[in-house]
Amino acid sequence: MAGSGSSGSGSSSAPCASCKLLRRRCTQECVFAPYFPPEDPHKFAIVHKVFGASNVSKMLQELPAQQRADAVSSLVYEANARMRDPVYGCVGAISYLQQQVSQLQMQLALAKAEILLCVQMQHDGHATASASPPSLQRQQQQLMESEAYGSLLMQNGLMNSTGAHQQQMLGSAGNTALMLQEACLKKESLWA
């Protein structure tokens, strides 16, 4: 079974990465050969280390031929993720990216609220205190929308302990907008 010679059976002259690593003869029926070429031994080595050759072989044999390439790509991706993060693997990477997206959405919402507030204040010109109730209502509506966004994240299971902190920050975003509005009104009253 030590068939790592240069003249292997079948059409290929070298055994696939799997057979080379496992030190066995690579045949034409080898389930690994189409997906683990000899010139990329690391690809199979990492999959073998995480999942085991027999498990990968069983998975590939149970799948239709047209789905095997996608399955191998997924196995390689997950194996690489498991090597970086043995506990969470791909889920850890996905969770991290979702948290980044949530933080960026929150920052974008804050930036939009600040821009809206500044444009509104410039548009109002020298507004008096009587003009503040509609603005206050708008700010309260934005606060409710940010809280609704936080509850939507919780319903979708996207919020963990970091997400709870983000919801706190979303709530404080509305408070920050209200404080910005009050500060702008105070500045205008000083200049009026």
Image (tube, helix red, strand yellow):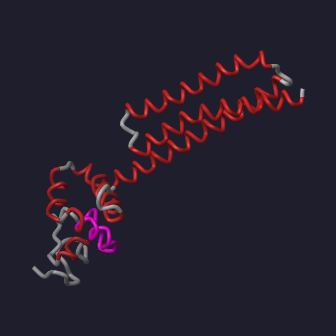
Q: Is residue 32 left or right of residue 113?
A: left
Quarter-of-image position of residue 46: bottom left
- Outermost right residue: 192
| Residue in the picture at 43% in, 40% down | 164
Position of the N terminus, as image quadrant, is bottom left
Position of residue 40 measured from the top left corner of the image (x, y, whole percent): 34, 72
| Residue in the picture at 39% in, 39% down | 158
- Outermost bottom residue: 5
Q: Is residue 40 magenta?
A: yes
| Residue in the picture at 54% in, 26% down | 145
Give the camera-side residue of 176 and 18: 176
Give the camera-side residue of 149 and 172: 172
Q: Is residue 90 magenta?
A: no
Position of the C terminus, as image quadrant, is top right
Question: How many labels, in total?
Answer: 0
Give the camera-side residue of 140 and 35: 140
Q: Is residue 88 above or below residue 39?
A: above
Position of residue 106 measured from the top left corner of the image (x, y, whole percent): 56, 39
Q: Is residue 107 above or below residue 13?
A: above
Position of residue 54 measured from the top left corner of the image (x, y, whole percent): 14, 63
Give the camera-side residue of 127 and 123: 127
Quarter-of-image position of residue 128: top right
- Outermost left residue: 1
Q: Is residue 171 above or below residue 161?
A: above
Quarter-of-image position of residue 143: top right
Q: Which residues are magenta?
A: 34-48
Q: Is residue 163 left or right of residue 109?
A: left
Q: Is residue 76 above or below residue 136?
A: below
